[in-house]
Image (cartoon, coloured by chain):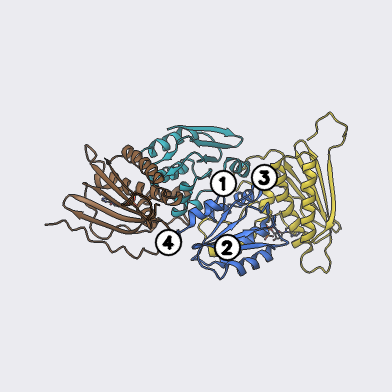
Chain colours: A cyan, B blue, C brown, D yellow
Amino acid sequence: MKMTFEARGAVGVLRVEEPRIDASVAIQFKDRFRDLAGSAEGDVILDLARVEFLDSSGLGAVVAARKLLGSGRQLALSGLTPTVDKVMTLTRMNTVFPIHADLAAALAAHAGSG
Amino acid sequence: MKMTFEARGAVGVLRVEEPRIDASVAIQFKDRFRDLAGSAEGDVILDLARVEFLDSSGLGAVVAARKLLGSGRQLALSGLTPTVDKVMTLTRMNTVFPIHADLAAALAAHAGSG
Amino acid sequence: MSGPTGRQSAPPRLSLRFAGEDAAVRRSLAEVEAGLAAAGVGDGLRQRAQIALAEACNNIVEHAYGPARPRPGPIALDILVEAGGLRVMLRDKGRAMPPGPLPGDAMPELSGRDPMDLPEGGFGWALLRRIAEDLHHERTGDRNTLRFLLPAVEKPRKPGELPRDCQIPSAIPPA
Amino acid sequence: MSGPTGRQSAPPRLSLRFAGEDAAVRRSLAEVEAGLAAAGVGDGLRQRAQIALAEACNNIVEHAYGPARPRPGPIALDILVEAGGLRVMLRDKGRAMPPGPLPGDAMPELSGRDPMDLPEGGFGWALLRRIAEDLHHERTGDRNTLRFLLPAVEKPRKPGELPRDCQIPSAIPPA
Ligand SMILES: Nc1ncnc2c1ncn2[C@@H]1O[C@H](COP(=O)(O)OP(=O)(O)O)[C@@H](O)[C@H]1O
Ligand SMILES: Nc1ncnc2c1ncn2[C@@H]1O[C@H](COP(=O)(O)OP(=O)(O)O)[C@@H](O)[C@H]1O
């Protein structure tokens, strides 16, 4: 599962380069997330701009990923495509994760906000 | 204070046509909100795409507006500009209000979601 | 969607047969997406179809066939494109649903929850219910049949309100 | 921001004098925005400056001058544009701060709160604190002077962690 991580000042940016986070890759997603972001410090922005689809298994993996960061770090989401936004809205998970229109907005909002 | 309201199916869209929601218009904002959206039914999307600035007084007015809808209705926000996003992030209010990249995304996500 | 003019007399229909496993579900959903787009189904309904069908298929893979099976069983998916929306029929040869009513549309409660204590599952059925109408499940012999409508126009639904039409035929296996 | 070349020997400075009332604050913030843009200050810092200055000025209007005054008192705002950020000095002739340390950077707690029970205020000082560094308040005679730095590069700050430099000179009026 293709995902890239980049430290941007105090914030880590994790970009998912796949069109789907579904049942068939949920476990891989969680493992990759741990490998890439687990040992870093600071908040993480998960950029979902390329993700066209997320099912409840994928959502569960995102929640699991958030827990990997521990309570001292935040997981923010950016670039929700329409179907992903719909799932976030129906499940109310859009009130659990801070959500930003795109990566630039997320970076501007999270730099230094700890 | 210029604000427009439009019913879109089961959802009401309230657009703020001013560049600032600050201490000097916070009370007006709350009054206009009540006049426009108070008597309608269903969830409300507050489109902030034209709002370049929101201070803590304006944020308080948005919270007050949300309460006017009562617990059976939701207030979602769309089109956060960078400074507004920053205030929402620093205060963590972005985990209180469902937030969507733009009005189209908010409409797609909220239609029928009650 | 095509009106009364044009050559097609029957409404467009998609019929897919695939294995009850994650990778096959993924491929089939991509086919559905392409098929519905070709049939002129709009963005919103196609998006909702992807969500609802993914959840329904995942449930079959996970619960009806489950991890104990050596080989995945088959899934049959039939979609009728009507003016009012998509009529869906999903069939499998897996385990019966647990007795009693089908799971409802209640989402796991999130508010007031420590992020470290958030639920990682339990959203599947609730998502399906929020999107689908006229949901019916039937057990006949060794088969499950799930039918629902994905309405072209979403109906507003109050949080917590159950859809009108969820009287569920109890899962009594025929004698 | 201008380097060692160029004709300006002193760093750019903005000095504004305005009435301690909402409308004048709004106009002055617009002037600051234009002035900082003209001085080449980047988007992020200008956005943070708008937030921090609005909160600091609102506090003066609301608490230092407050509703009891027949006429608003004056506010003096001076901003020095340095490579490391903006050095801000804000002066007013209003009431003294309440004795004891300045309000901290704790945001009102939101998690687990019923939406109908959310706080509508109490974010002002916390916002200022999260954005500003080296915050100092001084009472001399009948005046308040608030100084802070708006750093060009935001420093990461753990939630709940107080900035290092918030030892506050106690608000003892001179004899
Ligand atoms: N086709 C099926 N056959 C048997 N049981 C099912 C089937 N589909 C769903 N279930 C039941 O529904 C529940 C799963 O609900 P769901 O909301 O999808 O949760 P999850 O997302 O954790 O899978 C399980 O408790 C399971 O018993
Ligand atoms: N310039 C000032 N003079 C006197 N008191 C002040 C001043 N600024 C702030 N305060 C105090 O700070 C508190 C306001 O904090 P703040 O976080 O801005 O809340 P709010 O957003 O509700 O105004 C008040 O309790 C007030 O006593």
**How far apart, in angstroms, are the residues tagged by discs 1 and 4?**
28 Å
Q: Amino acid at mark 4?
A: Lys
**How far apart, in angstroms, are the residues tagged by discs 1 and 3?**
26 Å
Q: Amino acid at mark 3?
A: Pro
Disc number lying in front (1 or 2): 2
Q: Is residue B58 something that shows in the picture?
A: yes
Residue pointed to by mark 4: C155
* SS type, badge 1: strand
Q: Amino acid at mark 1?
A: His
Instruction: Check the image and report above or below for D170 versus C21.
Output: below
Q: Quadrant of ligand 2?
A: bottom right
- Of residues D136 and D89, the one nearer the viewer is D89
Quarter that holds the N terminus of chain D: top right
Residue C134 % position (x, y): 32, 60
- Of residues C69 and A80, the one nearer the viewer is A80
Instruction: Check the image and report above or below for C43 versus B32.
Output: above
* SS type, badge 2: strand
Classed neighbour count for the residue bearing mark 2: other residues with Cα under 10 Å, few (<14), some (14–19), many (≥20) = some
Residue pointed to by mark 1: A100
Residue B6: mark: 2
